[in-house]
Image (cartoon, rainbow, N blue to C red):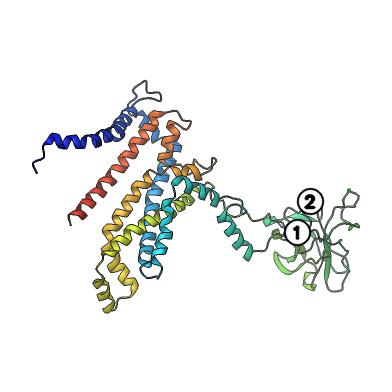
Amino acid sequence: MGTRPWVAAVFLLPALVLLGALVAYPIVYTVKRSFYDADGSAFIGLKNFGTVFSDHGILTAVRNNVVWVVVAPAVATALGLVFAVLTERVRWGTAFKLIVFMPMAISMLAAGIIFRLVYEQDPSQGVANAVVVAVHDTFTDNAAYPGARPRPNSDLRPTAGGSFTSKSTAATGAPADLPLIGIPQNKVPSGARDAKPAPAQPGSVTGTVWLDFRPGGTGKPGVIDPGEKALSGVKVQAVKDGKVVASAKSGKDGTYKLPAAAVGAQLRLPGSNFAGKYEGINWLGPSLVTPSIIASYIWMWAGFAMVLIAAGLAGVPRELMEQARVDGANEWQVFRRITVPLLAPVLVVVTVTLMINVLKIFDLVYIIAPGNTQQNANVLALQLYLSSFGGGDDQGVGSAIGVILLLLVLPVMIFNIRRLRKEGRR
């Protein structure tokens, strides 16, 4: 248009200076630095790259990055597609989109802190385990007396599953008492009654389950002394040839009664009486820390995918969908054969954009993963920081990791740019 080249150069100069200072120079310097040792004083060639591909901790980061690139973009894009399609069919679609997109307004730092609390092991603090424990306790009986056990050298001996089984067999006429210890006085229910000897009943097996300990230590082992407390709600099973033939629970006075089928059987206190309180799932343990962090990332970025896909969905010709419905296609067929193929370019752009994003993930892993499992959740961007500034003090290895990240991101960026240009020409 007749613009003089020097005029264009003057207008472009500020942008070029910024790009050179903030992008070009750091890239060139990082590539150069990757060929030098830890303090940058000696040229060592490709040794830093050899360290990257031989160090166990860095290989763990590489493996986790592969998991991130494969799982996180795919799941976030799939959820975004589902949300975008569903919001077109509900009355409050705009409000729903706002709610789903709202996490994007939160910084990675804030999201990491939020999910660090969500995944807290203590159910009284962590929301995730509070839900899990509530569901578990709804369908599973809690242990009556966690930590209780029989006295050493008593008739009860430890058996499989945390249970205790008697050596002798039960008989009528003689009480089959089951004394236990190991329960602190402050853990005994406040309304616990004093234990009572079970009366003998013909044709039945009776006995008492009680805390065989008297404050002050004046009681006699194996004997129901005055003041010793009954243990109510303890499950007692009669076992013959490995099979449970009868069961009962101790009453408020500690006594229980089994039918005639229990005569000649061994008595067993199952492990469910003594198991510790269920504390939920160790979300940030070595096996679940990476999936848990990926879930927090998806919570943030599914809204981003939904907004872009919804914009693409707005341009899909409605007459094609209506024609398919007229021809007898159900909603699933319309979605799979028409909606998804027409949205394929948008889905690819969203997926590739998220792939670039997850290659640089750092904040969530650094904040959410506790110190003892951070190595299990490690990713390349975090390893770059740890190697260079987080105690590793080896900027040569850190620069090599940065170069590898650049090489991984470049093909994806080029692919994304070329697709966007093709879409623009259309």
Residue 89 appears at what percent x and percent y? 37, 70
Circle 2 sits in a helix, a strand or a loop, which is it? loop
The answer to whether any part of residue 203 appears in the image is: yes
Q: Which residue is mark 2?
A: 184
360 or 213, nearer to the observer: 360
State if disc 1 and disc 2 touch (CB < 8 Å): no
**Looking at the image, residue 88 lies above or below residue 421:** below
Residue at the spot 29% in from the left edge and 54% down from the top edge: 349
Sequence-first disc among 2 and 1: 1
Task: Please tell me in which quadrant of the rendered image residue 236 appears.
Answer: bottom right
- Crowd around label 1: few <14 · some 14–19 · many ≥20 (10 Å): many
Q: Residue furthest top?
A: 41
Residue at the spot 28% in from the left edge and 68% down from the top edge: 337
Numbered badge on residue 165: 1
**Looking at the image, residue 60 lies above or below residue 153:** above
Name the amino acid type tagged 1.
Answer: Thr
402 or 263, nearer to the observer: 402
Residue at the spot 43% in from the left edge and 60% down from the top edge: 99
